[in-house]
Image (tube, grey):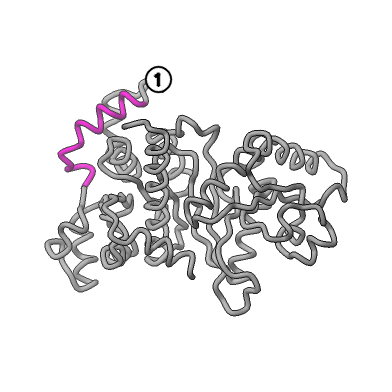
Amino acid sequence: MQPLRQILGAASGSDKIIALAEGDDYRVVEAALMIRDEAVARVLLVGDPAKIADHLATLGTTIDAVAGAIDIHHPTNSPLFDEFRDTLVTLRAHKGMTPEMAAEQVRNRLTYAALLVQTERAHGTVGGAAETTSDTVRTALQIIGKAPDAAMVSSFFFMLYCKEHHTVKGAHIFADCGLVVDPDANEMAEIARASAASYKALTDETPRVAMLSFSTAGSAEHPKVSKVVAATHLAKIADPDLIIDGELQFDAAFVPEVAASKASKSALGGAANVFVFPSLNAGNLGYKIAQRVGGATAIGPVLQGLAKPANDLSRGCSAEDILHMVAVTVAQSDALDRAVLASGVTT
């Protein structure tokens, strides 16, 4: 778990505030205590204080005892309610949002958590422990919005290989496994570039991107293969320094011996660390096979391309999964800070 420990270590002592949308879910409260103990972030729980207090009591502590490290906001009773209602009207006026509609939506925990980020009261948000991916992602898109320099919003899974049977240990990114159903060549190229940037932000290592297909280096002809070839070309034009190759079958991107046989001219040499799938169908199946059969740890789906971090959880997540996602969210926020400093633009 070395890559994950690196992320947790980098986040240790962080002053970043992460809003957890389902703050009165037992797993989320348990995770908040873990986050406090690891000093990964300052936690803001969105939920019913009475339920949170009950969960804390079960876990052997109280609201007063965690004050300072963990804050609690009840959307309906929040002193920010009127401000958030007016902010939502402004954000969604072009969609016919009225004050009455906005007031109802601010009571929604996902909406409230996203507004905390939009108004810079939190640096990122994590949801999806109980809410659906579609609701979690839609809320983030509507309220936080796409980053100005991003062509699109996509997602990835951070895949960790740390078990004895794993011949290759470390971290990979699989994209897009959770959001974009059938990317065209332009979209696939953008997913590749965004995923490479995410890999660099999370690991501080050089990304090596494989554009996956059922064909390697022209071994098959089909429009779906041509899409991957075109996407690879577009990504190279957009970023000539990016180490990328495609189209490649997974084994030719992952196993050096297979790469030597099937793709001897590939710049990856069977050592890719970012794998871009040609469709959500392939990507979702791929990460779940790696997780359930291969024993990889899968963190995600992590969203990329948003103005500020907002991430989704599996509804079957554990408290430890939430801890890990919060650490990734802090790393994304830190990467945004570095990008702003590098650009010389102040906010």
The residue that appears at 32% across and 40% down in the rendered structure is 117
Residue 184 in view (yes/no): no
Name the side, left or right, on which 277 lies relative to 136.
right
The residue that appears at 38% across and 46% down in the rendered structure is 333
Residue 91, image x and y in percent?
A: 35, 26
The residue that appears at 16% across and 57% down in the rendered structure is 68
Q: Where the C terminus falls, by quadrant?
A: top left
Residue 75 located within the stretch drawn in magenta: yes
Name the side, left or right, on which 184 lies relative to 98.
right
Q: Tell me which secondary structure the magenta stretch mostly adopts.
A: helix
Number of numbered discs: 1
Mark 1: few/some/many CA within 10 Å (<14, 14-19, 20+): few
> What's drawn in magenta, residue-wise?
74-91
Residue 171 located within the stretch drawn in magenta: no
- Image quadrant of residue 192? top right
Q: Which of 300 and 100 lies nearest the eye of the viewer?
A: 300
Q: Secondary structure at mark 1?
A: helix
- Is 6 above or below relative to 125? below
Q: Which of 104 and 309 lies nearest the eye of the viewer?
A: 309
Residue named by callout 1: 94
Residue 282 in view (yes/no): yes
Residue 33, image x and y in percent?
A: 27, 65
Name the side, left or right, on which 228 lies relative to 312.
right
Three-letter code for the amino acid on which mark 1 is drawn = His
Residue 39, image x and y in percent?
A: 28, 62
- Image quadrant of residue 97? top left
Residue 315, image x and y in percent?
A: 45, 58
Residue ranking furthest to the left: 64
